[in-house]
Image: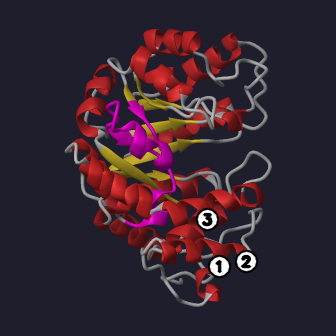
Amino acid sequence: MARYNRDEARDWARETLVGAVNCTIPSFTGDLKAINEKAIRHDTRLAREHGFIGTLGVSEVAITLPEYLNFLRIIKDEASDDFVVVHHGSWSDLAQNIEAVNGAEEAGAELVLLSYPPNFYPETEQDIYDYTRAVCDATNLAVMLFPMYLWGFSPRIHPSDIPVRLIRALIDDCPNIAVIKAEGGFPGIQGVIECHRHFGAEVVISMPIEAELIPLSQIMPIQLSATSDHEYYGPMIPRVMTLLRDKKYDEAADIYWQLSPARKAKAGLAGTLHGGAFLNRQAWKFQGWLQGYNGGPLRQPTQRIHDQQMTVLRKGLIDAGLNPSMDPFRDFFTGRNPA
């Protein structure tokens, strides 16, 4: 169970969510018939070793809800009590999302990343409000609101994806909204600046995009970077978060410039890897594998990653001095802990 009551969610978030949260993508057995507990435990341990304060249990893969909840239980069991397990509220419809968040609370999750289903087509701000409020009302867990272009709300609803006035209403009416993952209006930074200016005193503002996190943190306080594929950089994002908290801005800037080749490699592939307004979790899993995470097969349907893309991602890390795995690419598709 969570370490706080529903009406304490914002205080808990302010006190606890200080640092970086990565993503853990489910691992499966070689025959793809079950989740791979040994591999999941490996990834959880490595995330802690790299300095992450928690991890998002990614649900946007071919996995059943019972399997997913067991996946969260394994992460929780492997991690210490101070490691935050984040539930990925990304399921097919409102009813399934409510079922999932109730199960995640029982499984040991303490934070919910709220997403919106591909078939959810709001035509008014009230539609978004009603969906969001329904999920928040269904759980005692802290919720991370997520303005984001992937939902397709812009420009139909507002160019910022979820406008300030709607966020204001949700924060007023949902006391367990404790974090805003501020990517609204991506790729611009106006969304995170607005969230900080309007809501930073009430809820935690998270900036998950490291290319914006490091510069912005030098002029405005950002205590949390959650959730993202930070595992691509190994321990570097937790390390830079510590430097930023300590106001060691020159050292943080050094890391920003060091990561530049890897950042550019990843950005250069975004258009081919992440088509259809859907993140390529196979690619994210490969990025983690380069830094020692399990890798391994995903079930169909899944997006693919090809040799030329894997080569570019590894070369970016080499050029950044981050010593990626040089194992043959074929080993990624087996994983470090085959079962």
Locate residue 266: give its quadrant: bottom right
Q: Position of residue 122 (x, y in %)?
A: 76, 21
Q: CA distance from mark 2 to mark 3?
A: 12 Å
> What secondary structure is found at the residue carrying circle 3?
helix
Callout 3 crowding tier (Cα within 10 Å): few <14, some 14–19, many ≥20: some
Q: What residue appears at the point 59 percent right and 51 percent down from the top-left corner?
A: 59
Q: What residue appears at the point 26 percent right and 25 percent down from the top-left corner?
A: 11
Quarter of the image with the N terminus in it = top left
Q: What's the residue type where badge 3 is placed? A: Ala
Residue 227 magenta-drawn?
Answer: yes
Q: Nearer the viewer, mark 2 or mark 3?
A: 3
Q: Which residues are magenta?
A: 205-234
Q: Position of residue 136 (x, y in %)?
A: 50, 23
Q: What residue appears at the point 33 percent right and 60 percent down from the top-left corner?
A: 77
**Location of mark 1 (residue):** 311
Horizontal side, residue 27 vs residue 204: left or right? right
Q: Are marks 1 and 2 in contact (CB under 8 Å)?
A: yes
Query: In the displayed structure, would residue 149 be above or below residue 318?
Result: above
Could one spot residue 64 in this view of the protein? Answer: yes
**Location of mark 3 (residue):** 265
* First along the sequence among labels 1 and 3: 3
Residue 308 numbered tag: 2
Q: Position of residue 100 (x, y in %)?
A: 55, 40
Q: What's the residue type where badge 1 is placed? A: Thr
